[in-house]
Amino acid sequence: MSDAGKLPVARTYRPREQYLSLQRDSLLDPESFWAGIAGQLVWRRKWDKVLQWDPPFAQWFVGGLLNASENAVDRHVKSWRENKAAYLWEGENGDRRTITYGELYQEVNRLASVLQKLGLRKGDTVAIYLPLVPEFPIAMLACARIGLPFTVVFSGFSAKALAERIQDCGAKVVVTADGGYRRGKVLDLKTVVDDAVKDSPSVKHVVVFRRTGHVVPMIEGRDYWWHDLMAKASSYVAPVPLESTHLLYILYTSGTTGKPKGVAHSTAGYLVFAYATQEWVFDAKDDDIYWCTADIGWVTGHTYVVFAPLMHGLTSVMYEGALDYPEPDRWWDIVERYRVSILYTAPTAIRSLMRYGDKLPGQHDLDSLRLLGSVGEPINPAAWQWYFDVIGQGRCPIVDTWWQTETGGIMISPSPRLGLVPLKAGSATFPLPGIEADVVDEKGNPLPPSEKGFLVIKRPWPGMFMTLYNDSERYREVYWTRFPGFYYPGDYALRDAEGYFWLLGRADEVIKVAGHRLGTREVEDALVSHPSVAEAAVAGKPDPVKGETIVAFVTLRKVANPSNHLSEELKQHVRRMIGPIATPESIYFARLLPKTRSGKIMRRVIKAVAAGGPIGDLSTLEDGASVDEIREAIEALRVAEKSTKSS
Ligand code: WT7
């Protein structure tokens, strides 16, 4: 599986020995190691203490004062980079804009002034619900400039999901757009916001950026057009010096209960980690054209579309729309036209593009590419190989980057900057400097090579989230109790005989659909909220493009009868409750769900039936439900599966 022999590129990078010894040294004195990197940021006051570690709570760079927007934009406008492009933006409909660092600076200042004039003060929260337009980073940076923690909600989430997030953090202002484009259609974002705000009394104002120009209702005194407010804004707002541990943003992500977790990131630790990892992993220079394809609605966009590339003064490509619209070579057209040199994307995207064949990329000049990246889920060897051969033309190393919303930045990845190790298709290779990772058994004991176990991180790192917003107990419980003293990310992993890490997917009830994280419980809750549904059990089913798709087994209330119509209705119901990404692919009507005596759904069984695979040994199922009961339930599920398929 190793492609080491094929990688002529490895010769142009520093030797792996150097990298592995740097990684070792960084762990001998991690505090001075991180302090050395922190010194490269702009500070208003230097920190007194690098790390205050009261497990499981870490505070980084205690006593320091700094500002994220100053680090991202102000530092560049005093240099030649004032006229350098920060973003080369392309709308799905072909609109194009170039935003220089100088322009970004002006817009960020003006919007910060707008937010101030709307009455917002340091510590007030803002929700951002936008399509992928340059105003997205502008909104985030304007908030950061005056100390307003923001929460970005992916524009594919429903009104209900948006309202839940707005309410949890008590957002006073929502920044949105009239709409965005997706596959040639207008997404009506403002209407979604109106629905969400109806139930969210904390919201005083809605700022609406005009993207599509379709008619949207505006509520007098509450809603304002972005351009109207900007026309009256001041051109300069001093960046507020903020404590290192000031809350920069909250990003909600799925866990194993129905309620999303508000991952709370700090200012200093997060920025230092973003800054370091951007350099180690992508090794970008001023003449690179860097394209991280993630939507800013997810953490990848926060860190590697907004904060990290801006702090480094890079030029990023930003593309609003679907990857195969209007034609399936849209991405290759963009790579060719902007001369993209670094492409960072997700396995699910690679697999969808792969399905269109080798001819399309072949029709474009992809010679500008020099480095490829992958993130979000394990990359299967076939997709890796295609990415390497067809897109990278055998020239470009692939950085498979393992990390999470919680970690703030990349944790395990090859590092072209520090010394590229020989790559293996499907392995994220080694932890970055300062990161101590291991694979352990259920008891927390390190496992010998090639045995599958649980990934743990053994010491704090600057990018780690501070806590779960308003729920420090859940923070402790979810991440720190399973393996006391270690951070538990919820992933399976193994290390091979050469010490390489292989990340093997989620070990909990979280599934990844096209790289997006969803809790099975969230989808089950949505289904059960429908009047026809008594109970629901949801599982991920392996899918050749999306990685996993959602399969749901439901039992109905007496009033309802199974039908294709009801199945369709339930899918629509989930879309409305959560958003299109959570739509089940198949819904099966069952007579019974397999449960333990204490009433817990047997997920292993559900998963196995969903995947059509063998159930395994029933006698080991927890909680002593009788083998007969379980057999009956499995039979009921299999019958349900057949009858829906044949109907
Ligand atoms: C989960 C985190 C990291 C930003 C985007 C997703 C899975 C992520 C990899 C990788 C194998 C990966 C893990 C992780 N994951 N990257 N390179 N190889 N698995 O962030 O939504 O917080 O999801 O994504 O299971 O726990 P997220």
Image (cartoon, rainbow, N blue to C red):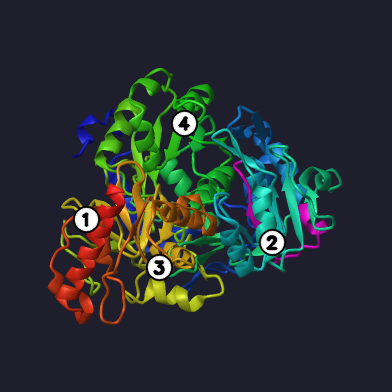
Work out whether residue 642 or residue 609 is closer to the camera in this orientation and state it. 642
Which residue type carries mark 3? Thr
Q: Earlier in the sequence, mark 4 or mark 3?
A: 3
Q: CA distance from mark 1 to mark 3?
A: 26 Å
In magenta segment, residue 408 = no
Which residue is denoted by mark 3 in the rendering? 256
| Image vertical order of residue 413 relative to residue 537, above or below | above
On residue 324, the disc is: 4
The alpha-carbon separation of the residues under discs 4 and 2 comes to: 33 Å
Within 10 Å of disc 1 (Cα), the crowding (few <14, some 14-19, many 20+) is many
Q: How dense is the environment of label 2, judged by Cα within 10 Å: few (below 14), some, or many (20 and up)?
A: many
Residue 283: which quarter of the image?
top left
At 65% across and 35% down in the image, what residue appears?
Answer: 81
User: Which image quarter is the N terminus in?
Assistant: top left
Check disc 4: other Cα within 10 Å, few if <14, some if 14-19, many if 20+. Answer: some
Residue 102 in percent (x, y) is at 71, 37
Judged from the image, the secondary structure of the residue bearing numbered disc 2 is: helix
Residue under pointer 2: 197
Give coordinates of residue 313: x percent, y percent. 59, 40
The amino acid beneath tag 1 is Arg
Instruction: Give me the disc on residue 495.
Output: 1
| Residue 629 % position (x, y) | 19, 75
Q: Which residues are magenta?
A: 112-132
